[in-house]
Image (tube, rainbow, N blue to C red):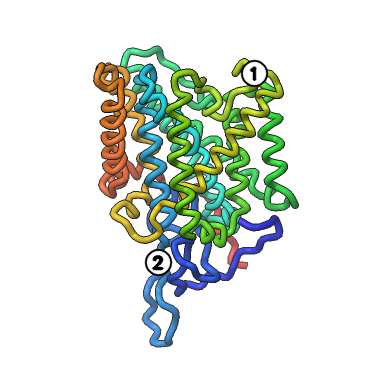
Amino acid sequence: MSDTKYSPPVQVPGDESAGPANTGARWPLPGGGLFERPGQEQAEPAQKPEPEAGPPKRRRDPYLDNVKFVLIALVVVGHSLVPTLDADSNRALYIFVYTFHMPLFVLISGYLSRNFWNSNAKTNKLVDTFLVPYVIVEVGYAALRFSLGQKWSLTIIDPAWLNWYLLALLFWRLSTPVWKRMKFPIPVAIAIYLFAGFSEISGDFSMDRFFGLLPFFVIGLVMQPEHFELLNRLWIKIASVFTIVAAATVAILIAPRAKLAPFYFKNSYEKMDLSWYMGLGVRVGLLVCALALCFAVLALVPRGETWYSDLGTRTLYCYLLHGIPVLIAKEQGWLDLPWLHGPLGALAISFSCFALAIVLCLPETRTVFKWVLEPRLTWLYRRPSRS
């Protein structure tokens, strides 16, 4: 996304080269969010009966949907690995995944937020897609924990577990107009990210993650389609393979002694038992490593239609619902089996989580849970003026 004086390109409904999967000079930018409703924003326009020759229908670009499905599957893997982190192999995989999967999620969210304030329908989604599901899921997970024998706990302002992302994304989107007006938004966001480590920021309203992952959202916000095209070059793809292999190797080497706190992008230097200069060094290094892995993954994810492209249009359901089976598995001790604490167990958990992600991204899952997670609240909003 470009500089702060960016004005959206004219959207041509017939531009089938739209999106980073192809190399068209201009392409309509997606205006939805990371959890965009299927058929919304990028949907094909209805066929008009007029005989006049017009441009063909615009296709939804599959590239970002491919990226979203890979990332949501890794979210499930990361959460499922937690009970097995005493094994070095599982811990190495956990560190590798957590270095980039949420930063890339946030970066894509920033990219998809650049046109967010350009229509009433998109601003309405602040309530439809974030606030309402947030409250419902908070209550639902509190009830689930209570049914599993835990103490009843419900604090709406302090999001539990995976629900932090909805609240953080809400505030990132509310801050979008500010970043778009700045001359140098990325340096400012990085400075805020670094200085936030000096303070113990509360988890209320996900403020700790808001500041800890802020640079990735702003970087996504200022990216342009051409930047995705640069990642499609052969030499960058080759370099990306070496980057991922090197990162996996480092994760294996540091797993036995590395602390996990820095990889959550939320803790202060004091809480991580770091001096201020060591804390700054850790945050800078983690930012560089996370960005390198983010761009490596973006370079290697397929750009054309794949068997999981359609699944990537329903990541909201996987994100909000996967916690139910994962939490049950943790509480029932299913993830404490000895054979899961090792390389074979890490592979078994990963394959199982990818299978779970597939199920939760199916259209049938959306059909069952749409009334809860994507309520239609048209009655809540005023009709836009015809003028």
- Evaluate whether residue 15 shows in this view: yes
Q: Is residue 85 left or right of residue 105?
A: left
Q: Which amino acid does the dot numbered 2 rest on?
A: Arg
Position of the C terminus, as image quadrant, is bottom right
In this view, the residue farthest toward the right is 183
Q: Is residue 160 left or right of residue 353?
A: right
In the image, what residue occupies the spot 49% across and 38% down? 100
Q: Choose the circle earlier in sequence order: 1 or 2.
A: 2
Q: Residues within 10 Å of mark 1 (few under 14, many from 20)?
A: some
Residue situated in front as seen by the camera: 33 or 226: 226
Image location of residue 248, percent across then percent down: 43, 35
Residue bearing mark 1 = 274
In the image, what residue occupies the spot 42% across and 87% down? 52
Q: Is the C-beta separation of discs 1 and 2 under 8 Å?
A: no
- Evaluate whether residue 34 shows in this view: no
Q: CA gap, disc 1 to disc 2?
A: 50 Å
User: Is 258 above or below relative to 17?
Assistant: above
In the image, what residue occupies the spot 39% across and 78% down? 48
Residue bearing mark 2 = 59
User: Is 296 above or below relative to 270?
Assistant: below
Image location of residue 277, percent across then percent down: 71, 24
Position of the N terminus, as image quadrant, is bottom right
Q: Which amino acid does the dot numbered 1 rest on?
A: Leu
Q: What SS does tag 1 mark?
A: loop
User: Is 285 above or below relative to 334?
Assistant: below
In the image, what residue occupies the spot 41% across and 32% down? 137
In this view, the residue farthest toward the bottom is 52
Q: Is residue 12 left or right of residue 189?
A: left
Q: What SS does tag 2 mark?
A: loop
Image location of residue 298, percent across then percent down: 47, 50
Image location of residue 316, percent across then percent down: 40, 43
